[in-house]
Amino acid sequence: MRKNDVIIGSAESLGTNGEGIVRADGCTLFVPYLLPGERARIKVLQTKGTVAYGKAGEIFTPAEERVRPACPVFTRCGGCQLQHLKYRYQLRFKQQLVADALKKIGGIDCKVSACERSEKEYGYRNKLQLPIGRANGENVIGFYAERSHRIVPTDVCPIHPDWAEKVIAALKTFMETCGLDGYDETTGEGQLRHIVIREIRRKYLITLVSAEREIKGLDYLLFLLDGIFREYSFYLNYHPENTNVIFGREFRLVKGDGIYEGVEGGIVYEAGASTFLQVNEEVRTKLYARAVSFAEAGETAIDCYAGSGLMTAMLAVKCGRAYGIESVPEASACAEALKGKNGLWSKMINCCGTVEEYLPRILKEEPEAFVVLDPPRAGLARSVIETIRQSGVKKIAMISCNPATLARDLGLLTGSLVPNERGELVKAEGSDYEIAAVEPFDMFPQTKWVETLVLLKKN
């Protein structure tokens, strides 16, 4: 099989990114947006040994599971991978995705529960994050293409609420009227880089990220936003550095209170412009309630990567005592405010710093604690895994949005993966922890991503 070859083939299954897998001429060919059972004309785009990547042309036998995508830029925008697949089959795919990752990467063969569905298949995201740039001398507002920083322009995004479409239109009007340009990553020219909006109980935290400290015509943008949102706060974020990080260090509150309250599981919490919160509130409620159900009254809980302290507080109420570890100062400050609002002064201890720094200290004082891990997509640092294994913690709940890093970290925690003399991870006979539950939650419908909750118990 060579580049630019055109073949006729059928997909057998779906790969980890939701692409169809076709076997032909001794090669495994990955074809995005091709479903199992579909026979299609495929152009080979790239080959590497016995692995190839292709693009589907005419589909001769569409699958029964195929549906018409809701988004006009689906297949060009990198945000969604599964809009062409009926939702119930998306759930089955994600359940199998987690099971395959655990077995192939972590050497763990265990039962994976059916994926918990989202009641909203579209319009579920409470956060909009739009890059603003330049292409061919024109401003572009949209979303990045898959594995690139090329912006695919769009006027609407179906996985966001209706207000997202209105914001895109207002931003275009503002830039055209005031003569402002999107930021060009190659030249460093242009003023506007991103707009980020977070919804909390129908109140909105809006941050405009700019390469310049002052933006002309800002009052006009606020006027346009007044016509969209009843109550909002507006930040101008100064970000002059040529990096992929969305926010710069300097935030200036232009309008509003800057922090808003939400309620989850009976806990009143606060969130600011850069506070982490799950993007699907309905699924988050189910996920957090299930994680807290693993805790027992009278034990101490340690919530690692605690964000604004929401789950820490829920654990404190259930257990009677909970530590929260969070490295972002703003989020940790919100957790402190949350502690006061909910009367948890004697039950909730917030630690502003890294998990690597604080977890060993706390476990020395609380060796019988229930540990909750909710790390970023890259997973756990090796030192955190070693701290847990050496401490002999008896019960762990782990939340992950990345099945691959989840499988790796679980393999290291259980002992089914061990590093060899070269530092490479190899399969072994695990015995340290038993996996008592693996429960996927569909936090991100229409995408390849899945949130997974795992309960581990010490053997």
Image (tube, rainbow, N blue to C red):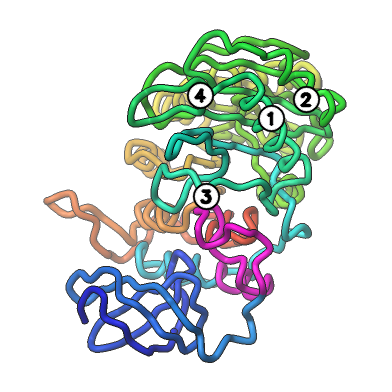
Task: Kindly identify which residue carries mark 4.
Answer: 247
Give percent across and percent down for residue 43: 34, 77
Measure the alpha-carbon separation of dots 3 and 2. Answer: 38 Å
State the residue at coordinates (40%, 24%).
Answer: 357
In this rendering, the answer to whether 96 lies above or below 412 is below
Query: Helix, strand, or loop for circle 3?
Result: strand
Residue 382 left/right relative to 80: left
Numbered range of the magenta stretch = 68-95
Farthest left residue in view: 421
Kindly indicate whether the residue at mark 2 contacts the one at mark 1 (C-beta within 8 angstroms). yes
Give percent across and percent down for residue 146: 44, 53
In this rendering, the answer to whether 57 lies above or below 213 is below
322 within the magenta span: no
Amino acid of disc 2: Leu
Residue in the foreground of this view, choosing between 265 and 292: 265
Q: Residues within 10 Å of mark 2 (few under 14, many from 20)?
A: some
Numbered circle sitting on residue 224: 2
Q: Residues within 10 Å of mark 1 (few under 14, many from 20)?
A: some
Mark toward the start of the polypeptide (1 vs 2): 1
Measure the alpha-carbon separation of dots 3 and 1. Answer: 39 Å
Amino acid of disc 3: Ser
Task: Kindly identify which residue carries mark 3.
Answer: 400
Residue 134 left/right relative to 299: left
Mark toward the start of the polypeptide (4 vs 1): 1
Measure the alpha-carbon separation of dots 4 and 1. Answer: 23 Å
